Amino acid sequence: MPFLFNDTKMTILPFLELPVRYRINAEPWLPKMTEFEAGAEISEQLLQKAVDIFNEKASEDFVTFMEKNPASDWAQTDLFIETEKYYRQYIPFLNERKERCFWMNFFCRPVGNWKSHRVEVKAGGTCYFSIGLNIDTGKRFDFIVNGKV
């Protein structure tokens, strides 16, 4: 299925919203919408691989926890990431090798002025996560799921 940009749950932010650690050796990439969507289609595949690995580990951890704590009344909620349920911020950029990259930020609910400023939180568990994706090499980097409070 081709990528479709949904402006009610997605936004493209300017380069200056990119976290500083990525901006140091990078430069802005201003793709036309067709180029953005082609890159986003690749990024969806890379993202899904990272999410599948995360969800598999979360499932294993849950099973282990329940085996050690059989009397626990803990439900299997908010453990897994289902990307279609999230709001998204995309920041396109070129890395130090001039390769096209996306830094993507995900969150469960709209936060503040999310369409023009990067959402940054310290906790929140699986409700907040981010990932870097290199469109040209097919590599993902810095898949970070926020911790619990």
Image: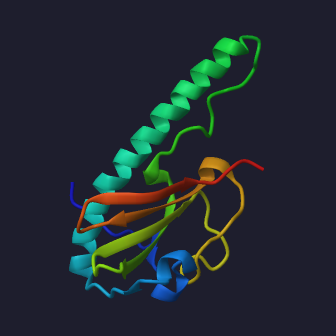
The structure residue drawn at horizontal position 69% and vertical position 65%, both measured from the top left corner, is: 121
Its colouring scheme is: rainbow
For the N terminus, the quadrant is bottom left
The structure residue drawn at horizontal position 76% and vertical position 18%, both measured from the top left corner, is: 72
Can see residue 107?
yes
Counting every numbered tag in the picture gives 0
**Where does the image place residue 61, in percent across and percent down from the top left?**
58, 27
The structure residue drawn at horizontal position 48% and vertical position 37%, both measured from the top left corner, is: 55
Q: Is residue 33 rendered to the left or right of residue 80?
A: left
Q: Is residue 107 rendered to the left or right of residue 48?
A: right
In this view, 83 is above or below 109: above
In this view, 114 is above or below 46: below
Q: Is residue 113 rendered to the left or right of residue 69?
A: left
Q: Is residue 97 rendered to the left or right of residue 11?
A: left
**Where does the image place residue 85, in percent across and percent down from the top left?**
49, 52
**Where does the image place residue 38, in percent across and percent down from the top left?**
21, 70
The structure residue drawn at horizontal position 63% and vertical position 34%, both measured from the top left corner, is: 77
Kindly indicate the quadrant of the structure image that contains residue 30.
bottom left
Can see residue 3?
no
Kindly indicate the quadrant of the structure image that contains residue 25.
bottom left
**Where does the image place residue 41, in percent across and percent down from the top left?**
25, 62
